[in-house]
Amino acid sequence: MTSFDSGVGMISTPRAVARAAGGLIHTARVVKGYIHARLTKGAAPATVKNEVGVLGRAFTLACRSGHMPHRPYLPSPRVSNARTGFFTDAEVRTLP
């Protein structure tokens, strides 16, 4: 089982994640707190969204394998990082 340092504490998936979430009823509240803590510590919104995505995937797999009755709702931070400053055709031709 893989663990990672979430910045809030060590989390192993999927059983420890369910325990850390405090049960299905409180999951959204706990995830909102996690998101707030990570953003406050300076994590990029896209990074936090990806971390919540991993948690969501863990819940999905736990449901499919019968370890959880259903997948809880997980809030996700908004990400506004659309790319800007594209190369023109002339600039692309000058690249080595």
Image (cartoon, rainbow, N blue to C red):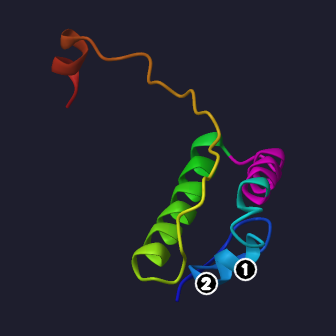
Q: Which residue is nearer to you in this view: 67 or 85? A: 67
Element carrying mark 1:
helix
Image coordinates of residue 85 in percent, x first then y, are 42, 16
Looking at the image, is 30 positioned above or below residue 88?
below
Label drawn at residue 15 = 2
**Residue at x-position 66% and y-position 43%:** 44
**Residue 77 belongs to magenta span:** no
SS of the residue at dot 2?
helix
Front one among 44 and 49: 49
The image position of residue 91, as x and y in percent, is: 25, 15
How far across and down, in percent of the image, does residue 29 sit?
A: 79, 54
Q: Which residue is mark 1?
A: 19
Q: Is residue 39 magenta?
A: yes
- Residue 65 % position (x, y): 41, 82
Q: Is residue 15 rendered to the left or right of residue 35?
A: left
Q: Along the horizontal axis of the image, is 21 left or right of 84?
A: right
Residue type at mark 1 is: Arg
Circle number at residue 37 = none
Chief SS of the magenta region:
helix
Magenta residues span: 30-43
Give the quadrant of the C terminus: top left
What's the residue at 77%, 57% (across, down)?
34
Residue 89 as seen in the image, left or right of residue 43: left
| Camera sees residue 49 | yes
Q: CA distance from mark 2 to mark 1?
A: 6 Å
**Which residue is at 70% across, 67% downward?**
6
For label 2, the crowd category at 10 Å Cα-Cα, with few meaning under 14, some 14 to 19 and many 20 or more, is some
Q: Are marks 2 and 1 in contact (CB under 8 Å)?
A: yes
* Residue 11 visible (yes or no): no
Q: Nearer the viewer, residue 73 or 80?
A: 73
Say what amino acid the circle numbered 2 marks: Arg
